[in-house]
Image: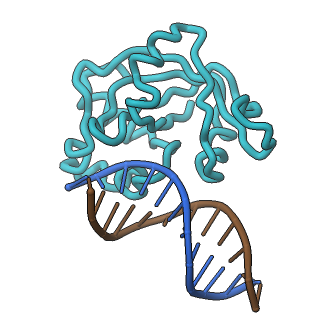
Chain colours: A cyan, B brown, C blue
Amino acid sequence: MAHWLFKSEPSTWSWDDQVAQGDAGEEWDGVRNYQARNFMRDMKKGDTGFFYHSQSEKAVVGIVEVIAEAHPDSTTDDERWECVDIRALRPLARPVTLADAKARPDLSEMALLRNSRLSVQPVTEEEWRIVCDMGGVEP
DNA sequence: GCCAACGTTGGC
DNA sequence: GCCAACGTTGGC
């Protein structure tokens, strides 16, 4: 099972919005970047990911699960763009901030730190365990 | 609010 | 196919 990171501006789509969708989840639509789209195409049902708040908060706040694999993005007729569906699994006991992650030498290779503009990113098994541990949540 | 980094577009 | 111009994102 692979791990990922989904980035969102809380003012546009927040963790609370995601939680409100319950187990039905929601499309991760609106992505218009090939790299991010390609990562979504690689996702499998049951993969898990971090939900990251950009802008004001800059922290991983929750864990989500992929519940539907890549399909056309309903917000556009452009067939190039696809997205997955995700649902909220559980919040982190303590959000892991960007500053927290930067302070960890063992997270220095994380895509979040190396390419801050990528909105959907892969997370390695090791990074997954470290961030879950820092956040006080079961991996 | 600014600016650096990066992706995309379009002219040649 | 290259590269300059432009737009967007996100950290500070």
Up/down of A132 relative to A22, above or below: below
Q: Residue at x 38, y 40 (%)?
A: A126
Q: Is residue A27 left or right of residue A129?
A: right
| Image: A78 above or below C8 | above
Q: Work out whether residue A70 can be spotted.
A: no
Where does the image place residue A108, in percent across and percent down from the top left? Answer: 30, 55
The total number of labels drawn is 0
Rendered location of residue A72, percent (x, y) = 76, 33
Q: Is A35 placed left or right of A111 in the picture?
A: right
> Residue at point 25% right, 28% down?
A95
Of residues A97 and A124, which is closer to you in this image?
A: A97
Q: Is residue C12 left or right of residue A47?
A: left
Task: Residue at 39% x, 30% y: name it.
Answer: A11
The residue lying at 33 percent from left, 42 percent from top is A55
Q: Nearer the viewer, residue A74 or A129?
A: A74
Can residue A57 be spotted in the picture? Answer: yes
As drawn, is A67 to the left or to the right of A57?
right
- Find residue A120 and report its horizontal and vertical position in percent: 52, 42
- Taking A49 as reference, is A138 above or below it? above
Q: Choose between A57 and A105: the one closer to the eye.
A: A57
Quadrant in which the N terminus of chain A appears: top right
Q: Quadrant of the C terminus of chain A?
A: top left
Locate residue A125: give its quadrant.
Answer: top left
